[in-house]
Amino acid sequence: MVSFRRCILALTVLAMFIGLASAQTPLTCATNVSVTPTLRAEGYTEQTGDISLICSGGFSTGATGSQIPAVNIQVFLNTAVTSRLLPISGGPSNASEALLLIDEPGSGLVTSAPPGFGPTAPQLVCATPSTGCTEFVNVVGGQTVAVDAAGGTTSGRNVFQGIVNGNSVTFFGIPVLPPVTAGVSRVYRMTNIRANATSLSGGSAAGATPVIASISISGATSLQISNPTPTVGFVQAGLTATASSATGQNQCNNFTRAGVNTLSFAENFGTAFKTRIAAQSNTAYAGQGTATNQNIPGTIYNSESNFVLAVPSGATAGQADYGTRLKATFNAIPAGVRLWVSTTNVFNNALPVPSPTPAGGSAGNTGTTGFAQLVNSETINGGSTSGVFFPGVTSTDVPSTGNTPIVEIPVVNGTATAVWEVINTNPNAIETLKFGVYTTSTANVAQNSPPAGTGTVNLSFAPTPTAAFTAAAGAAASSSLTIPRFIADTSAARNILTINICRTILLYPYVTNVQGFDTGLAIANTSTDPFGTGAQAGACALNWYQGTNNPAAGTSGNIASGTVYTTLASTAVPGFSGYMIAVCNFQFAHGFAFISDLGARNLAMGYLALVIPDPGSGSRTATPMGCAGLTGISGQTCNATGEQEGH
């Protein structure tokens, strides 16, 4: 856990309740944002910096027992406020997790305030956020303080929930007890204000867009604010996600958990990756549990959760649903291809990043290599077992090379999804988390399986909008949508895998069986060899051309690896004289033709079939040797993959 008190907080609170006699002055408040954070441009629920109003001076509010005047403090942002809504039964539905704290309760800072008041007071939440709570003046320990009842000695309410409406949050009925005495300050801290950063993601000339707060005061008294429009954050893209070069696999080969791609998620600033809460012990998944003491005012926790506190509605303010999640959405995966992913991040597809000991503990947040684990959904937050809060997926396999823990993810109609959650991260380092992708497929050329095609992937933070979670809903405050939540990938899908057809194209330039001649044809499947080439098998389509009245295409039938198919032109296409192109559904086909008079008594010759470079889905070009060294051919488009036949 990163837990420290900001200098400004200490100086401010130490000054409170010091009884220095002085002439009274008007009540004035200086605005302070002790830390101005960087917000992820992809995020709908980004944490803004705490706003503190540090107030001094003022005039006495009245005699002991009199009611303290109250104000409404409204904060507007230049984007929507998206703090979680915490509806109150019989009360407002838009009460939220945004909180206003008076005089840093629970901070434990040393002051001269009476015990139980100011920083030493317990955190007491007002149960009526739409009206605030009435408080009274009293003198305790020789000092004027706010109490909860006329003549009482118990601190008044010092935590108030905000009411969210569009791009503003309002704290109603905030008692204002002027410090009066020179050198004494009263602090109003506003925390847990979340913002929709996606609407400010365009950037600015300085490279980041500021989130601007505008503070308005209304009510029974007034507060003069020296800076009513503080900057509470800067918006910057939080993630750069890439995939390695697409791997080509041949349709005619079998693959078993073969590594095909490495996905990389790189944060653009040191706090773009966050754990669910700040791990406060070096125990397993300490950063993925429910926060119990993440409630010290002014502390920077560097987690998806902020200031966490139970409120009277029975809900918890400030608690995120999980840590930063990273999502891969696979698309257009060819039928017959099965997908595996690494369950943790890797150095490369064969070598996993070692797990911190223990995973999720506080010690794992001090190194420079973050750690993430696969979870079973982008929105599920698991259950609690002995304090562990993590819906991790257990590895079932290892890849064909290496010892990386992997697991299969289901492919449905060519689509699959994998989501990893960051469970250890160092906020003082920019980290890149990589994950391996692996495939299994069984060659069945006769059934065109797997079919030729290119699989792609989109990469983003998670969760992202779905049919139940629209972008419009995600951009507004909600009581049901998760925190955090993000926009979908705005980049083009990245290629990860290409299935290539296995075939060889043979040209027999002259074939005849007329005028007393015949042609013997042979096709050898040479995929069995002494070099370890995988054995392939398939049929060859025999395409006959003689200008007009071309015979229908024939087939060789399946040619097993290491065997030779033979036929006579007189048998296959009686009365034919022309050329033939054989398209064989395996690699390393080679052909031979032998033309002779009947019985080969007088004239005979043989030749090797020419191998035509496979044009794929394109067409052959007339440029024999490609475009190398050519400046262009009149009337033609030069194609660098020109026809370069060979024997």
Image (tube, grey):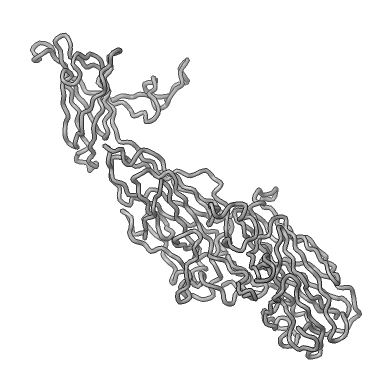
Q: Taking 618 as reference, is 324 above or below it?
A: below
Query: In the image, what residue occupies the spot 46% across and 59% down?
Result: 377
The extreme right residue here reads 23
Residue 270 visible in the picture: no
Q: In the rendered view of the protein, which quadrant contains the C terminus?
A: top left
Q: Identify which residue is drawn at 28% across, 42% down.
A: 443
Quadrant holding the N terminus:
bottom right
Q: How many marks?
A: 0
- Tell me if residue 230 comes above or below residue 57 in the rendering: above
Residue 299 to residue 509: above or below: below
Query: Percent x, y for residue 572?
Result: 18, 21
Residue projecting furthest to the front = 90
Q: Is residue 612 left or right of residue 163?
A: left
Residue 16, percent across and down? Answer: 78, 80
Q: Quadrant of residue 315?
A: bottom right
Pinpoint residue 481: horizontal percent, then vertical percent.
58, 60
Which residue: 83% across, 69% down?
A: 219
Residue reaching furthest bottom? 141
Whether residue 174 is visible here, answered yes or no, is: yes
Residue 549 placement: quadrant? top left
Percent x, y of residue 37:
65, 62
In the rendered structure, the answer to whether residue 203 lies left or right of residue 597 reads right
Q: Left or right of 603: which side holds 77?
A: right
- Residue at point 51%, 76% (across, down): 281
Left or right side of 130 for 527: left
Residue 334, quarter of the rendered image: top left
